[in-house]
Image (tube, rainbow, N blue to C red):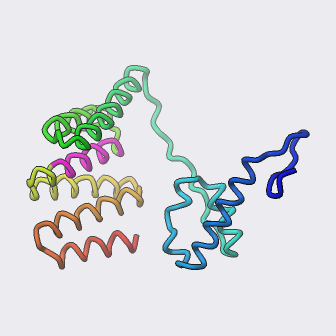
Amino acid sequence: THALGKLVDGKVQTEFAAVAAGLALFAQLALIFGAAALEGLCEVVGPAADRELAGLLGVEAEPVPAPTEEPERSEEEELAILEAERLLELGHIEADQSRDVEAQKCYQDAFEIYRQHGHRQGEGLALTGLGGVSLDLGCHDEAIEHYNRALQIYRDTGVKRREGVVLGNLGSVYRVRGKLDQAREHYLAAITL
């Protein structure tokens, strides 16, 4: 058997070895840089790894929150939400290619669909995209407006991670404008969530 693997139904589970090695590396990095420096890494690999890493570090893992209940939607509504999600993805691609006007249209169209169907978190995502495009276009006041609207949605819905992202984005707008005190304020608010 593999040194870090385990025998299950007569087969060595090599995936376990990779996960164990990765968690050991996380633990070493946490000891070197401090556990706070690795905040959010486990979000990428999932709650099980988060609990495993916490065990390796000798700390208590945060409880895994229950998934938010989405309202029951008709097939028509589900298809509309799917369309909005694809529009967001297209908006990201357009923005990545510096096609800001096209990205802006995708984000605006996605926002309208999400709004029509009461999908608040989707509205927040679309507004965040609109804020980024507005910043790229040099429309700082518009970027701030979009980001503030998204921030309010994330606060209303309790999505702390997205709230932190938007606070950081607002900090970037203020930094670009040369308003360093306001930028610092927003960056610190994002860190302390």
Q: Which quadrant would the C terminus be assigned to in this image?
A: bottom left
Furthest-top residue in view?
Answer: 76
Residue displayed at 71% across by 59% down? 20
x%, y% of residue 35? Answer: 55, 75
Q: Residue, x 69% and y 53% (percent of image)?
A: 18
- Towards the viewer: 122 or 28: 28
In the current view of this chain or complex, which residue is farthest to the right? 10
The total number of labels drawn is: 0
Residue at the image position 30 percent from the left and 37 percent from the top: 88
Magenta stretch: residue 89 in it? no
Instruction: Please report the residue visible at 45 percent of the width from the left and 36 percent of the height from the top.
Output: 71
Q: Nearer the viewer, residue 133 or 112?
A: 133
Q: Residue 151's x, y, as percent? A: 28, 57
Q: Quick check: 27 left or right of 120?
A: right
Question: Which residue in the rendered view is the most extreme toward the front?
Answer: 2
Would you say the magenta stretch is mainly helix, strand or loop? helix
Image x and y of residue 133, in percent? 18, 48
Q: Is residue 30 above or below residue 155?
A: below
The stretch in magenta equals 121-133
Would residue 182 appear left or right of 85 to someone viewing this image?
left
The stretch drawn in magenta includes residue 124? yes
| Quarter of the view holding residue 152 | bottom left
Q: Position of residue 29 (x, y in %)?
A: 58, 72
Q: Along the line of sight, which residue is nearer the eye, 92 or 191?
A: 92
Vertical placement of residue 37 versus 128, above or below: below
